[in-house]
Amino acid sequence: MAPESGPVPVATGRARALVPALLFAVLLVVCGITLYKISNRQLDLHEIKSPLIGRPAPAFSLPSVADPTVTVSNATFAGRTYVLNVWGTWCAECRAEHGALLQIARRGGVAVLGLDWKDDRSAAIRYLAELGDPYTAIAADDDGRVAIDWGVYGAPETFLVGPDGLIKHKHVGALSMSDWDKEFAPKIAALAKSPGGAP
Amino acid sequence: MIPELGHFALVLAFLLACATTFFGLVGAWQGRRTWMAAAPGAVAGQWVFVTLGFGCLTYAFITHDFSVAYVAHNSNSQLPLLYRIAGVWGAHEGSLLLWLAILSSWTLAVAFFSGSLPERFRARVLGVLGLVSMTFMAFLLSTSSPFARQVAELDGADLNPLLQDPALALHPPMLYTGYVGTAVAFAFAVAALLEGRLDASWARWTRPWTTTAWLFLTIGIALGSWWAYYVLGWGGWWFWDAVENASFMPWLASTALIHSLAVTEKRGLFKSWTLLLAVFAFSLSLLGTFLVRSGVVVSVHAFASDPSRGIFILALLAFFIIGALALYAWRAPTLGSDAGFELVSRESFLLINNALLVASAGVVLFGTLMPMFMDAFGLGKISVGPPFFNIAFLIPTLPLLALIGIGMHAGWKQARLARLKSRFLVLLGAALGVAVLVCGAFFSHLSFMTVLGFTLGVFVCASAASLPIERWRRGEHLSRAVLGMSVAHLGIGLFTIGVTVAQSYKIERDISMAAGDSYSMAGYAFHFAGTKNVSGPNWDGVEGEVSITRNGRPVATLHPQKRVYRVQTNPMTQAGIAVGPTRDLFVALGEDIGAGRWSMRLQYKPFIRFIWLGALTMALGGAISVTDRRYRRNPARAAAPATLDGGEAKHGA
């Protein structure tokens, strides 16, 4: 056996050498807790809530799809309830939810802003001419920076912003009328009732 | 009948693994030579029966035995032969069997090549490997037998289409060979801890095994990255996904271990640190297996995960990791290091190398597990993505690159770098010149990070290449170990150049095109000729034709496909890629958006081949160094003069 070299006594050395074991033990305990929660269905890792809910909607100011010389900014809608729908002509599911968006627009009561994500402007104009245009205004997010600010994972995504400028809800994937009636309509009604929240 | 034979073979293999464990560990403890001598035979028997079991499962796949539940869930009568074989490891049960088959092969190789090691030490190594086999076989047999029967189905549910690809057929065996190979270094470390002694010959025995495991891990990760690039259809090559991180952490730990072992062999230093790294590398491999299989972290790779299996793996994890680390805590303080070294020496460089590699593994571990920790302590849900990793990972790795270039030339004990200073400055200056020239002449813009990354890459390449060239010019002997080191570091340099250029100058466009449309990007014109319907043995699809020209001259004609596999009906993209040494042109066919228009993703990826070329070069370097002559000498005789702690352990009767 090699004798202990250096001034550290073996007992102290042993205590120090236990640190990695303790760190790994903590790690494994946390793994165990998580596993326990998953098997008891207390935790669903695949449900990712947007961290932006309850936070101020990120401001943007982008050229309009219809006319690039016109600027579309969500500041214009401050004090009102509005919906921001992220879409693109390249996205098949957007086409699927388009009918629902048209119906929402026909019902009125809330402005629907479009964010045309990483898209070709002329394709977008053709697309809307073909399918109809549900949007109050459409901002062209060519480089996708605004979508990043809003934490967009993929199109389509639809956000609800209250008159206080806070994000109230986020829907991922194609929106159907039943989604709208269940998730959006009650929130919009509640916002309209709250003081100072007339849309 | 064949599946039952396979199951029976696995039961026999389990019993033989128990025998290896008993004869190896108890034999060495009690000093019974006949018991210790029985361990290699049990290892050979275990290998035979695991291989037989594996063969039986493969046979069930090849012959479409849909009465076996695992085959019915992962194969189909129309599945081509190659993917029927790869289907064996297409899901959890078979992957675990592959894992065990590879572990048995590693154990057999250790038994075969370790004949000249001290008998007690050898028995302990085999005993520890037997213990790993035994516990994982118990896991396989009790919770995840691949041979479970069911009422025969007419046809199978088919293999996950994502896995029906040649690179992915090879990826798991390579990756597992690397993962499981860390068990060998672990077994050597635990055996040394049990003996309570560790000397230079220990490091020399351990090194080739560690390097071999590391090189397979390198190839496995590179294959996975290449597959993600052209199959997932996004054109990215690394996503910092939990599953990728799970393979990357043991790679970082093994890389640190390889370097630490060099110091332990040459100078008798860093002994306890080397042991700790060997335990870490295997622990991170097991942790990776656990993370992937239990579903405690979110991953884009859709593995079937099952919490009840997770508990079993967690228990194994706790047993091996905490057991080994507790043993380490007991023994390590008694393994002194005997020599000191100067501040400027190869030892110092390798110490910093180790600290930086462990720090980078820590960054990856932190980012991967942070969401889980936050949730467990009720601190809310977060997701940690590429923006965190891309920045945090550079903090330890950029200085590491600079030190690689210098450290290779530093001598042991005390280096006279002052003599080399002018050469380093020339190399760095030349590297900076090349970086500015290449980035400025061929690409649109320069940024600080781009120039920094490119300069460091070229500097590492030049420094790595200069080492063997100089030895050769001075007529000195060039050992395979030194050559291998230079080649591996050259690989790091190439990889760095590839990552820097590909990340800085990539161009990605998501556009819609109709037949006849053209789109220009990065000096290339992409002309979309239209689509036609195509079909394969078990899929139907649409194939686009995109011809690419540059200044009017044809460059390539690509045929990106969008496939729908008949049974599982999920769409798959098969990108069209024009491969070139300095750039890839990448076309992925998206959705039919009506009126004859298709959404498409066009990408220009400069130097992206350097990323995989770099990884393969690293693996080649590892392969060269493993064949170094000193590993082939009789280890027992070579060990005698190098023993640092004098006395030989007493042999039992």
Image (spheres, coloured by chain):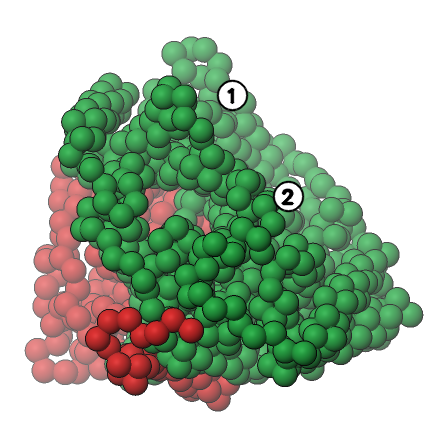
Q: Height in image: B179 above or below B291?
A: above
Quick check: B569 left or right of B487? right
Q: Tell me the quarter of the picture where residue B101 sits.
A: bottom right
Q: Which mark is residue B166?
A: 2
Task: Name the colour assigned to chain B in the rendering.
Answer: green
Q: What residue type is labelled 1?
A: Ala
**Which amino acid, mark 2?**
Pro
Q: Which residue is drawn at 55% across and 47% down?
A: B631
Q: Mark 1 points at which residue?
A: B556
Query: Are both tags, 2 and 1, on one chain?
Result: yes
Residue shown at 43%/45% (left/top)? B237
Q: SS for tag 1?
A: strand
- Of all chains, the one bearing label 2 is B
Looking at the picture, does residue A88 appear above or below residue B193?
above
In x, y percent, where is residue B361?
34, 60
Tell me which label, 2 or 1, sits earlier in the chain. Answer: 2
Residue A152 % position (x, y): 31, 58
Parent chain of label 1: B
> Farthest top residue?
B552
Q: Can residue A189 be seen in this view?
A: no
Q: Nearer the viewer, mark 2 or mark 1?
A: 2
User: What shade has chain A been given?
Assistant: red
